[in-house]
Image (tube, rainbow, N blue to C red):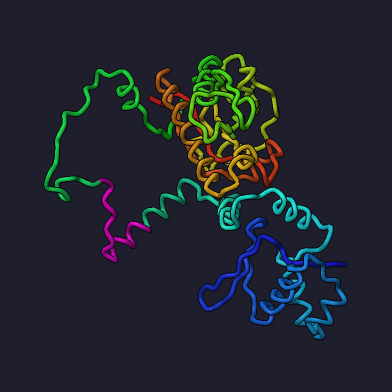
Amino acid sequence: MNFRLSNTIILYPEKGKFFVYNFLLKRSIDISINEISLLRIFSEGRKDGKWIDEDCIYESFLIENEGSKNSFLKLVKAGVVIVEGSENDLLDLRYLSFWKWKFVTGSYHFSLKDTSFYSGDAEKKMAEAFEKKNNALGVEAPILYWENKNEYVNIQYFDKPTSDDEILNLMSRRRTIRKFDREMAISDKDLLNIIYSGLGITGFKTVDYGGTMPLKMTPSGGARNPYDAYVMCLNVTDIPRGLYHYSPTEHSFGLVKESLVVLPSEILGNQSWIDSAPAIIFLVANINRTMWKYEHHSGYKVMLIEAGHIAQNMILFAVSRGLNGSPTAAIHDGNFHKLIPLDKISQSCIYAIVLGYSLK
């Protein structure tokens, strides 16, 4: 049996101890000085691109007692040390061959997956405790806006826009709500138009580098358009309940899964109010589309920003039809994967827009 060090680990100190964290597996363990020495030997072996066999490990590490053996097995179990041919080995190599952006970008991206979220009641109690603690310490909340009169001498004042401007009036009506009328269905036409406003293709353009590029309703870095929409239809006219994939070239829905094995709230941060919504749009990033052109790690930032452009278009169009769109990034990837088996390395659900009519 052969072993090597994982390519996705971080060593860091905290509260007088050292910890090693595998961000791809989301596992963290505290380690001793002796165990750090074992990592160093594995790290030196990795420079040569060679696996270390079991005999060499016992010879080099002088593993003679039960405690030393347990330390080695502890590193293997945590995915810090990888067994050749194992599932962790294949996932690690998949990451190494695919991920072109920097190591720190990868650690950030994969560390955010499968975040644990509090339920509504628990979150409220946490917020109350947090505010009480800050008040006791005299820590004031930061100012949420700056005023020029407090900073500058030369100031020009202007009249605010009038409310009769159609676009500004529409924007002013946008609100994020937490209470949907579960009895009121969304029309299939409104739902498809909402999606089209964010992802619809308006034409194509051929460029020297990249071939034929789709032109969409929102700006996209390098016109790479990394996002696909998966739509959970729960109460939509003329569309059976299920999860669908939206095709922007066909303006069509493809049924991904008819049986919804998880509640929407189980995917979206245990927010129970979401379960009353008639439709939810999930924006899934196909990372390779952006990474193919932009190998610099700033491409990751561009990809995230684009989700905001798309969601804003969809939300504003929803408002124009008397609907509300409430965005959320509180996504539990593992539960979303129960609906659709996305590639864990190259695809990621980044954002969701919850749609419906406000409960009067």
**Is residue 167 shown to the viewer in this render?**
yes
- Residue plotted at (63% across, 31% down): 210
Left or right: residue 231 versus residue 314 is right
Q: Could you say where residue 161 lies in the image, as x and y percent from the top left?
A: 22, 25
Decide if residue 336 is in sight here.
Answer: no
The residue under the point 76% across, 57% down is 88
**Image spot of residue 47 (x, y percent):** 73, 68
Residue 143 forms part of the magenta stretch: yes
Inspect the magenta stretch and tell me whether residue 78 lies in it: no
Q: Quadrant of residue 33?
A: bottom right
Picture quadrant of residue 42: bottom right
Is residue 160 shown left or right of residue 62? left
Q: Is residue 293 above or below residue 259?
A: below
Q: Nearer the viewer, residue 187 or 37?
A: 37
Magenta stretch, residue numbers: 130-145
Going by the picture, which residue comes out furthest to the front?
208
Specify the quadrant of the image occupied by residue 290: top right
